[in-house]
Amino acid sequence: MAAVEQEIPQPRGRARLGLPKGEITSATWRALWGYIRPHRTVIIVSGLLGLVGSLAGLVQPLAAKWLVDDLGTGASLTGSLLLLSGMVVAGAVIGAISNYVLERTAESVILSARRRLVGRLLRLRVPAVESAEPGDLMSRVTSDTTLLRQVSTQAVVSGITSAITLVATVIMMSFMDVVLLGVTVGVLGLVGVVVSLVMPHIARATKESQAAVGKIGAALERMLGAFRTVKASGAEDREEERIEGAAKVAWTAGIRAAKWQSLVGVTAGLAVQISFLAVLGIGGARVASGSMSIASLIAFLLYLFYLIPSIAGIVRAVSQLQVGAAAISRISEVDAMEVEEFASAGARTATDEPGRVAFEQVRFRYRPDLPDVHRSVTFDIPAGGMTAFVGPSGAGKTTVFSLIERFYEPSAGRVLLDGRPVADWPVRDLRAAIGYVEQDAPVLSGTLRDNLTFGAPGVGEDAIAEVLRRTRLDGLIERLPDGLETVVGHRGSKLSGGERQRVAVARALLRKPRLLLLDEATSQLDAVNEAALRDTVADAAKTTTVLVVAHRLSTVTMADRIVVMDAGEVRAVGTHAELVAKDPLYAELAATQFLASV
């Protein structure tokens, strides 16, 4: 039996999504605004609360100055102490409320981003998904969206409020002493130069770190997706090295980002300390000369310490914006991937009559750099009955089903259902008319009931019981302790290969399709269950159009017509007896491959 991988070429080395540097650009701001806009009112209110709390703190140095002045004059300290205490309590309460509202809003932003991103992933075209690593796509939904918390609320609000508070603090300091203000601004100006030089390095390191996290997810998905094969091949050490290698890349990039962030933090802290020493020395000299009062010097020093959280807030905001830019860049890459258009609400077509399928001069290749898989494929399958597709591996049989389902689009020619090009069908309506059983018969994590009703969630118990009987699954259900509610494990690991195939067939039949596509649906069944399933398929062919890709002679001979494919072309169409007599390739397959597979 030919594996899917033999017929559907995989991208060389798995084409990677682009990795832009992640700097803050106009596109970054537009994307960021898209996340913030639904929550802008709450963010503005919480930002104003935070600003009020910060500005309330600016009264404290003045109150301290008044307190020192009162000490010098012998006046009552009660008013100054009450004002100072009130400002401290008010600033703390308002700041706590603002922080809670911001954190809550940040979680809402993440939820919205994940909803939108998951919706986008589910609507990606099949070639777009096949060009990326699933683990990397998953990391964009999980870790990259988490980084939006920092940039969407904390960075924006904290940056704005810190900047306003910084300006207000500088203004208040100017009233204390202009000379000391000049000294402070000169020292702090150096911080801005250092930060502007370091931030691009943080952006690049963060981008590399997030890309490496995506590679870890891809490596884990690869390992867990073939867990038994890994163990049977004794490849645990090699896979561990592969995952560890990706983890080391993430570690290296994270260390690099931490190095630059630490440099920024140290520079900011050092600048404040130098400013404090300079102000203390120069201010002390000015107090000694009588140019300013001791109370003004104390107030100025307190304002200087108020600059610390403001400067730290600005530096942190810029750093978070760089980190967020990297996350937004990776998320935006998914937005740029091609999606399917779902113009319909998913209603079934008006008729339940069997579908008619035709290919007209269809050409198709999986990538521009690969040869054609289909070369001028033409056939016409009437409504109803069973049609089998046979041919050597790589002939293009499975691709026929993929084109009917519109997983791919032909490069030339037309694929028609009921005389109408499938490209003109709304995707939901097209697929609602089709039941499809893939070659590897995938089963999803969850219960047996979940899997059976996956394509027809509203189906009744009688219909489920009937399809279980027809696919010989009723005996399995009776043996299981939880019946239909039995959990089947990751990818149906608790079921045998034949049981997974029968579940997949039952799932397709429950949809009551007008067109049933079966890709090697009996390959893993024993003789008894294969015979029962053949009867089920024959019964289904009375009310629907059944197309099967098959290698077993017992399945092929029961078909009403057989389409023989070779090297991407249709060689012949006919019954088993007709083709044995007139087509040498079919006669050879019937005498060797088919009979050997029985």
Image: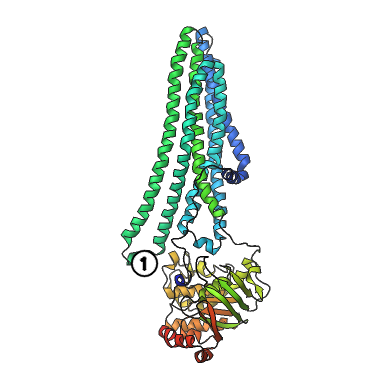
Where is 521 relative to 258, above or below?
Answer: below
Where is 562 relative to 307, above or below?
Answer: below
Residue 81 shows up from this direction: no
Q: Which residue is mark 1?
A: 229
Q: Image quarter for residue 257?
A: top left
Q: Image quarter for residue 268?
A: top left
Where is 429 relative to 219, above or below?
Answer: below
Q: Position of residue 172 (x, y in %)?
A: 56, 20
Nearer to me, 104 or 54: 54
Residue 295 shows up from this direction: yes
Residue plotted at (44% across, 74% down): 499
Residue plotted at (60% across, 71% down): 412
Q: Position of residue 124 (x, y in %)?
A: 56, 60
Nearer to me, 101 or 119: 119
**Which image quadrant: the N terminus?**
bottom left
Residue plotted at (53% across, 34% down): 96
**Which image quadrant: the C terminus?**
bottom left
Task: Describe the element under mark 1 as helix, strand or loop.
Answer: helix
Q: Position of residue 264 (x, y in %)?
A: 44, 33
